[in-house]
């Protein structure tokens, strides 16, 4: 178990991620999302990028976090594999993300992910910590 599982969903795909705390669950949700995009084993840890997002609540923070990572993938061609969330509260998250730019010779894009959605969104703030999100593909 990688801290996440992929959920079947009509016309979309879901992720249910767990962790020892919410920061780990959010990081595992990001890993789960990138596992849908490409094989995580092909991503090298060559670049470090700082990512910060804000939102009015934890649920929106999860959606904004994943959508910011998708933006970096779509616009900058970045694939991430490791996520260290340095600080997080109900309205902000800052993280260090490690990965590399897409290399078409090594990275096969499996599924195009358009966005993280609010449909069936869950954030558990107590043990066992978990998050669930449906991705529009």
Image (cartoon, grey):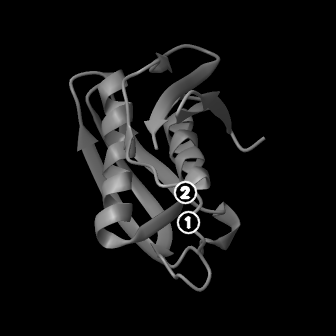
10 Å crowding of disc 2: few (<14), some (14-19), many (20+): many
- 113 vs 67, nearest the viewer: 113
Residue marked by disc 1? 109
Whether residues under marks 1 and 2 lie with C-beta atoms below 8 angstroms apart, the answer is: yes
Q: Position of residue 22 (x, y in %)?
A: 51, 29
Q: Is residue 4 above or below residue 44?
A: above
Disc with the residue nearer the chain's start (1 vs 2): 2
- As helix, strand or loop, the secondary structure at mark 2 comes to helix
- Residue that appears at 33% across and 29% down: 89
- Residue that appears at 38% across and 63% down: 73
| Position of residue 22 in the picture relative to residue 58 (left or right) | right
10 Å crowding of disc 1: few (<14), some (14-19), many (20+): some
Q: Is residue 45 above or below residue 37?
A: below
* Residue 75 visible, this angle: yes
Q: Position of residue 84 (x, y in %)?
A: 49, 52
Q: Quadrant of residue 78?
A: bottom left
- 110 vs 73, nearest the viewer: 110
Q: Quadrant of residue 40?
A: bottom right
Q: Position of residue 29 (x, y in %)?
A: 54, 40
Residue closest to the far front = 11
Residue marked by disc 2? 37
* Residue 19 visible, this angle: no
Image quadrant where one finds the N terminus: top right
């Amino acid at each position: 178990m990688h801290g996440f599982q992929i959920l079947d969903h009509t016309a979309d795909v879901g992720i249910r991620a767990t962790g020892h705390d919410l920061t780990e669950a959010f990081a595992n949700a990001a890993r789960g999302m990138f596992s849908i995009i490409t094989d995580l084993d092909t991503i090298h840890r060559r670049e470090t990028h700082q990512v910060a997002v804000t939102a009015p609540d934890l649920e929106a923070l999860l959606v904004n976090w994943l959508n910011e990572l998708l933006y970096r993938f779509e616009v900058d061609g970045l694939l991430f594999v490791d996520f260290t969330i340095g600080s997080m509260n109900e309205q902000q998250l800052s993280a260090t993300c490690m990965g590399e730019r897409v290399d078409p010779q090594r990275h096969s894009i499996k599924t195009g992910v358009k966005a993280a959605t609010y449909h069936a969104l869950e954030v558990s703030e107590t043990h066992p910590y978990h998050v669930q999100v449906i991705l529009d593909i």
